Amino acid sequence: MDPVGEVTMTETTVAYGQYCPIARALDILGERWSLLILRDLFLGTTRFNDLARGLPGLSRSLLAKRLRQFERAGLIEKIGAEHLLTEAGTQLEPVLFGLGEWGARWVFGAPREAELDAALLVWWMHTRVDTSMLPGRRQVLQVRFTDDVRRFWIVVEAEVASVCETDPGYPVDVTISADVAGLYEVWLGRMPLTHAQRTGRIIFIGPPALTRRMPAVLQLSPVAGYVAASGHPDPTARAS
């Protein structure tokens, strides 16, 4: 198999100068934000504006630079407005999620205050909505946090989910009421949803026929299984 493209010193500030496949890989992947951009590409985010929205701490200029580096290195190709993984890029999946599994076991714990970004959480959640579980052409889920004054809406139309930070003007079908940390911990597998509901950390408000579907509609993070299996779940949930 031919090697993917090489990144030169003009394309990146990282160059280890060692004749070693690990060093060569890190020349491409070792810079800040690189692996998180790849994470989002693996999860199906392919357009520049959507990548930028899911990486709020990353400047648009640096995102553009990283995408150019990935393209020159043969990890992605741009087709129209989409950045799509190549064969070389897709083969990074076990590396990336292996890192997630290691992180879940050894360095993951209770959320830090600086990590609790409500807008980012709702953005992540909308990418995992199982729209096949929702009836009708349009369904509106409002996310109402008990400790953040902002309101968010996940609008599902024709089986496509989008996020609104202003009222879209449609009737709300289900309201999800939660504290930010609690919803993060459920979505990332630290706290079982059943425990969160039993203790009032998460409440679904709406017709029972719809609220009963929410555990299936709101699929968890792709790394939630690693977190749940790590042996470090939420201690309150474990004690109950």
Image: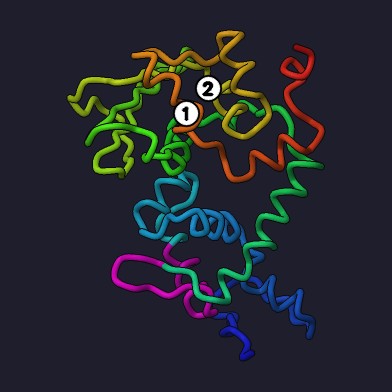
Q: For mark 2, what is the residue? A: 180
Q: Nearer the viewer, residue 12 or 20?
A: 20
Disc number placed over residue 79 in the picture, else none: none
Chain part drawn in magenta: 64-83
Q: Amino acid at mark 1?
A: Ala
Q: Amino acid at mark 2?
A: Val
Check contact, mark 2 vs mark 1: CB within 8 A.
yes
Residue count near mark 2 (Cα–Cα under 10 Å), binned few <14, some 14–19, many ≥20: many
Circle 2 sits in a helix, a strand or a loop, which is it? Answer: helix
Q: Looking at the rendering, in which quadrant would you find the N terminus?
A: bottom right
Going by the image, does 76 lie left or right of 150? right
Residue 219 position, x and y percent, is 51, 36
Q: For mark 1, what is the residue? A: 118
Q: Is residue 154 magenta?
A: no
Residue 97 position, x and y percent, is 67, 55
Residue extending farthest to the left is: 169
Residue 7 position, x and y percent, is 58, 80
